[in-house]
Amino acid sequence: MSKSNQFKPTANKNFIEFRPNGEDFKLAAERSEKMGVLQNSFTRGAGRMSGMLGEIAIHKYLENIAEYSGDLVRGYDLITEKGIKIEVKTKKASRIPDPSYAATVESKKTYMFVNDIFVFLRGHDSMAKFWLLGWIKTSSFKRMSTFKNAGEDDGDNGFKCRVDQYTIPIAKLKPMSTLVDYLISQ
């Protein structure tokens, strides 16, 4: 699978689907192994591959616009030539998400808002495909998101928050199709 056909619009046209190839899995495994299990990881490292594949997807999506920096710094995964810091957030899912579902950022006390932009993805449990959901400026996310404590209901979907987190409906994110133009215009 060449890079050019790894991305395609979803049937509902809300998101962009990414299908990782063998090279992507190899790179994600290398990065995951290097990272190890993060302190306070409630999945004990099980989500690392999905997170790494999400970072790879966005890096490929922003080809020639942003460089990977996730192994050098905490708080963002990519940085543009103009210094815009992008944090990629990936959650696992059993199916394509509904726009009413939440995009979330775990509450961290030290480095959670050092980035300029959040990009959100959902990765299928099989890791065969990922959905690029949208993006938001960090300043807008801070203003528009809702804080939820661990154990609190995560909306009306029957899920409970596993950690303290900030949430925003996916529908309030900017479409992925606008990210490249935004970054070029800055």
Image: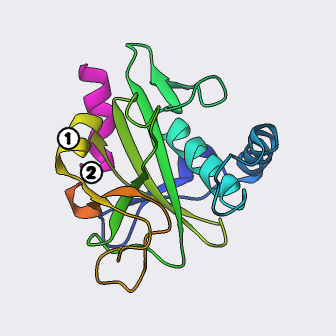
Q: Which mark is residue 140?
A: 1
Instruction: Indicate left or right for 149 with 174 as reference.
Output: right
Residue at image position (44%, 38%) is: 109
Which SS class for mark 1?
helix
Residue 102: name its quadrant: bottom left
Amino acid identity at mark 2: Pro
Extent of the magenta region: 173-186
Mark 2 / mark 1, whichever is N-terminal: 1
Instruction: Indicate left or right for 92 with 35 as reference.
Output: left
The residue under label 2 is 175
Mark 1 neighbour density, 10 Å: few (under 14) some (14–19) many (20 or more): few
Q: Locate the C terminus by quadrant.
A: top left
Which SS class for mark 2?
loop
Residue at image position (35%, 77%) is: 153
Amino acid identity at mark 1: Ser
Residue at image position (75%, 51%) is: 25
